Image: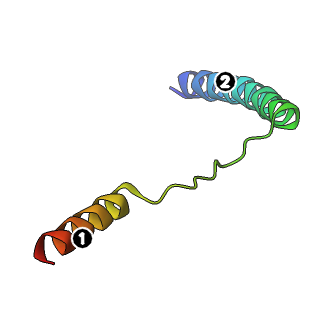
Amino acid sequence: MKGIEKKIVDVVRKEELKFNKELKKINVLVKDIDEICPIEKPSYTLPLADTIGRTYYNTLNRSLFL
């Protein structure tokens, strides 16, 4: 039984090493891509959609009752 456990532990360790190597490669790739073209959050000048609707609705109501 201990032989099987040892084999399983060896296989898991080997797979963890492979995973760590691949993860490091991916992290380096992401850093390189970020240096080439950094990701910036877009800035919007329009108000939110619900604000536009509310403003229009309020103006419509004011004009009907005046």
Q: Nearer the viewer, residue 51 or 15?
A: 51
Q: Residue furthest bottom?
A: 66
**Colour style of the rendered protein structure:** rainbow
Q: Quadrant of residue 53?
A: bottom left
Q: Position of residue 9 (x, y in %)?
A: 62, 29
Tag 2: amino acid: Glu
> Viewed as shown, does residue 11 lie left or right of 29?
left
Q: Which mark is residue 45?
A: none
Q: Quadrant of residue 27?
A: top right
Residue 54 x/y as whole percent: 28, 65
Q: Earlier in the sequence, mark 2 or mark 1?
A: 2
Q: Residue at x 80, y 40 (%)?
A: 38
Per the model, the C-alpha gap separating discs 2 and 1 is 63 Å
Give coordinates of residue 45: x percent, y percent.
57, 55
Residue with the most extreme left position: 65
In the displayed structure, would residue 16 be above or below residue 48? Answer: above
The residue where tag 1 is placed is 58
66 horizontally vs 50: left or right:
left
Up/down of 63 relative to 12, above or below: below
- In the picture shown, does residue 14 fall above or below 45? above
Residue tagged 2: 15
Other-residue count near label 2 (Cα within 10 Å), few / some / many at <14 / 14–19 / ≥20: few
Please name whichever residue, 27 or 41, is drawn nearer the observer in this view of the structure: 41
Instruction: Name the residue: 19% across, 70% down.
Output: 63
Q: Secondary structure at mark 1?
A: helix
Which of the two discs, 2 and 1, sits closer to the camera? 1
Q: Which kind of residue does numbered mark 1 sit on?
A: Asn
Q: Nearer the viewer, residue 59 or 44?
A: 59
Residue at the image position 56 percent from the left and 28 percent from the top: 5
